[in-house]
Structure formats: C-alpha cells, structure tokens
Image (spheres, rainbow, N blue to C red):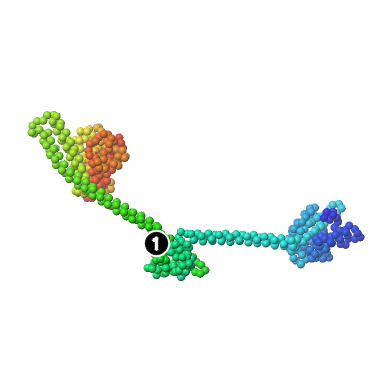
Amino acid sequence: MSDLKSGPSVNRSLQGEGSPEQWLAAITDLSEDAIVSESLTGEINSWNRGAERLFGYTSEEAIGKNVRMLAEPGQEKEFDLLLGRVLHGERIDHQEVFRRHKDGTRLFVSLSLSPVRDAQGKIIGVVKIARDITQRKITQESLDESQRALEELRRQQERSRAEVIASRRFREMIESAPDAILEVNEAGQILVANKTAEATFGYERSELVGLGVDSLVPIAYRHAHAAHRSSFARAGKTRPMGQGLNLTAVRKDGSEVPVEISLSPITTSTGVQTIAIIRDISERRRTEEQVRSLQENYMRELQARHEEAERLNRLKSEFLASVSHELRTPLHTIIGFAELLVEQAEGPLNATQLRFLEHIRRDSEHLLGLINDVLDLSGMEADGLTLHAEDLNLEQVIQQAVDGIAPYASARVVEVRRGEIPSAKVQADAGRLRQILNNLLSNGVKFTPAGGHVEVSAVLDGRFAEVCVRDTGVGISAEEQERIFEKFYQVGNASGGVREGTGLGLAICRQLVEMHGGTIYVASKPGEGSCFCFTLPLSTV
Ligand code: ADP
C-alpha cells in the first residue's frame, strides 16, 4: 500500500516496457481485491480485474465514469464524506461500507482509501482498494441471528420452566388448602377435587370426580340446590352460598358436616364452571356451642344470684322493720317516762339526777331517730312506701324547713339562711320533702364549724326545680363524695371528728328524691364547704 501512496496513478494505457508502472499494473490486475484509482472529482482512472469481478462493470465501462455510480442510492453523502477526508490527506483503512453492483445487488465491502500525490506532494487523486465482505457479513449476520434465536429459546425455556414450577406450586397450594375445593361444570358434575375435599366428604378422589355435586347436599335441599346452581352460573358473580343459613354437607357415609361455602364462576372453553370452596366448620360450631352454653349457664346463675340477693334483701328489710317496730314501742315508754320525771311532777330531783335523766332522754331519742331511719329505709326497699304527692309551694316548704332547723343551728352557732327561691310549685310528698330538706340542713349545720352558715336556694330548670343546700363546712373529698349516699356510710376524719347520726340520712334522701323522679348530687371540696342539690318535678298546673 505504501508504494501506492507515493506512486503515480495507474492507467492501462501507460506506455513503456518493463516500466515500474507496467509491473504495478500487472500486480494490480492479479489482485483479488478491487483496486480503483480516481481523480479529485471522483472520475475513475483505473479499474482492475478485481473491480470488474466485484462491481460487474468492465474497465471499459467504468473508466471515465464517476465512481459515485457505485454508491447505494441515498448514500452519496457518505461517499463524498469519505472522499473529502482523503483529499485532506487522510488515509482510511478497512472502512466497512455498502456499495452497489452493476446488477443492483447490494455489496458489503471493506474499503481502504489513500490519497495519491505528485512529485511535489500535491494530492492529484485517490486510490481505493475494496474487498468484498458480503459473504462474511451474511455469515456474521446469520450467526448473530442464530445467537439471538438461541438466546430467545433459552429465555423461552426459562419462562416455561418457571411456569411449570409456578403451576406445580399452585397445584400443591390448592391441594394443601385447608378448605375443600371443587370445580363443578354446568351439569353439576365435579371435575376437579383437592385433597381436603376427600377428607371433608369421605370420598376417594376418583369417586369425587364425575360425582354429581348435588349428592353432597342434604336430601331435603337437593332439589332446590339444582335450581340455585344454574341461576348462580347465569349470574356469574362470586358470592357466599346460603348466607345467613346454617349449611351442611352430606358425607359419603351419610353423616352431615356443618360447612361454609363460597362460590365463584369461571368461564372456560367448555362453558361456565363453578369453583366451590367449602370449609368444614364443625370445630367452630362446637366452640360456639360451648360458648353459648357457658353464657347461658352464667346468665342463669347470675339471675339466680340476683333473685337470691333480692330475696335476702327483702328478708332483711322485713326483719329490720319488725325489729325496729318492736324496739320503738319500749323506747317511746322510756322517753315518755324520762320526760315525766324531768317535769318533776312526782317530786323534786337533784341536779345530778336531772343530768342523768337528760342523758337517758337524749340517747333514747337518738336511738329512736336511728330506728326510724332504719325503718324508713327498709320500708322503702321493701316497696312499702307510697308517696302522697301534691302541689307544694316551694318557698313555703323551704321556709318551714329553715325555721325548723333554727334552734339546732343557733345551738351550734351556725346561721341558716334563705337564698334566692323562685316562686314555684313542686309535685312532692310534703312530709318526705321536709324530711329531705331537714336531713340536708341538719347535715350542713352538723358539719359546719361555729361561725359558718348554711344557705338554701333554688332555681328552675325546665320541668324541674333544683334545690341546693350550701354550707361553709368541712367539705368532702372527691372519693368520699361517691360513697356518702351509701347506707351506713360516714366519712371518718374528713368530717372533722363530727360523728353523730346514723349514716343513713343521705341514703334515705336519695331514695326519696329518686322516688319523686328527681336526682341528687353533691359538689364539695375539703375545707371549702359542700353543696347538696336535688331536683323535683314542677307542678304541671
Ligand atoms: P349521717 O347520719 O352520718 O349524717 P348521712 O348519710 O346524712 O349520715 O351522711 C353521710 C356522711 O356524709 C356523713 O357522716 C358525713 O361524713 C358526710 N356528710 C354529709 N353531709 C355533709 C356536709 N354537709 N358536709 C360534710 N360532710 C357531710
């Protein structure tokens, strides 16, 4: 190649025996490759045999023509680009390009180009060597193609292997599902059954396949089932079967098993098939049954205990009522005679005797109060109390209660006063309402240190009047507030050491207020006094 680069262009018409040009021409002619030289504008100057073979043009046809005739249609630009690079002095080796044979076929050639210079080094033309690599290219392409096909084959194989594995896994999954799974055709014939189906229905799989699914349905429902089956296939929707019903399936041995069934249709080439998933719920039913019977036993026991407690309570109330009654009679005698003695109608008594008598009288009265309270409460609990409700002037009733407590309050140096009281009428039993007010007022006085005060006020609230007794006494802690309405409950030290009474007053108040259809509650803070409020229905007239 290097001699070509520096040598002159070769023309078959060159003269001179044994000249280097002739030698060169002979060598060129021998070459298997196409060797072509051309002018700066691409005009063909020489065309060897190799070029004739490769491109199909004889040298006579080619010489003088423009080399662009070898360009593939539309590729002339690339042609000029290569030429341009060579004319700039570049040498191009083994460029793989497409060319066109005289008969129009496409050739794939490996092209080397080199500029040809004159003695002064000026470029005067181009020489090209083209080697046909079409065959090689075809071979390469078909090799690539087979490589690709092989690759694709391998991928396909992998895909189908994965599919096989997936479908095997799927089958295993279906087989080992905890539910029986059946595929049933439109005629109601079982096509596929999993392993759990064998255990659930007690059939071998070979017996299940082909069996009419209706034979798994209790005889009483078989007829209806066949109708349901065809309507299900028509509706084509997944749904539970017999929702809300206790379904059972019949096993091969005729025994019945409680089941839960869900159905879903699938469309296949042979029609709409139904997939039935059947769960044996015997265990769940057993547990539900156990829970239910436990619950029933528990409720029965609870009821029995409740009745027993009520009976005992009634007995207790009756007992208390009769005992209290028996105690009251002699107490009245004691108090009566003590009072007579105090009056000294039967002769004078000395100061000590009078003091002793006063003790007897006071404690007897306390005992009588206690017995009256017990009697009251037990009477209420034994439903022995009837209210005589009437329309009462609220202001009047409260005033009477305030007046009634005055001697007791002044003895303890506690002021009892009236706050705001609207004029209104309430529906209440006069005696019982006085009892409530008296209880609250005497508690207020009792638990308020000397110098304090107790105030009664009322407001109207809808269909009720709310009466409040507020004191400036010792107050009650939040925990105690919840308990003071219980029977016999007395706050220990929180009452500031005050300990007289029975612990029944508030229990009686609550009973009475509730019997009137009202409610009672307390708001208090230790050291800041208490406020007891209760409601009573207003008169409707
Ligand atoms: P008691 O006969 O002891 O007064 P109550 O049922 O009337 O019985 O009251 C229960 C307890 O509630 C009282 O012993 C007292 O500790 C507390 N209590 C009631 N009223 C007041 C009050 N106004 N201030 C402080 N404590 C009170």
Depth check: give the residue in front, 419 or 125: 125
- Amino acid type at image mark 1: Pro
Q: Position of residue 387 (x, y in %)?
A: 20, 48
Label 1: which secondary element:
strand
Q: Position of residue 371 (x, y in %)?
A: 19, 41
Question: Which residue is located at x 18 percent, y 36 percent?
Answer: 363
Specify the quadrant of the image occupied by residue 480: top left
In the displayed structure, would residue 272 be above or below residue 363? below
Relative to 234, 4 lies left or right: right
Depth check: give the residue in front, 528 or 342: 342
Question: Which residue is located at x 24 percent, y 38 percent?
Answer: 443
Depth check: give the residue in front, 30 or 163: 163
- Res 175 visible: yes
Question: Which residue is located at x 75 percent, y 66 percent?
Answer: 104
Question: Which residue is located at x 44 percent, y 62 percent?
Answer: 199
Q: Position of residue 41 (x, y in %)?
A: 80, 58
Q: Quadrant of the N terminus?
A: bottom right
- Res 428 visible: no
Residue to which mark 1 is pinned: 258
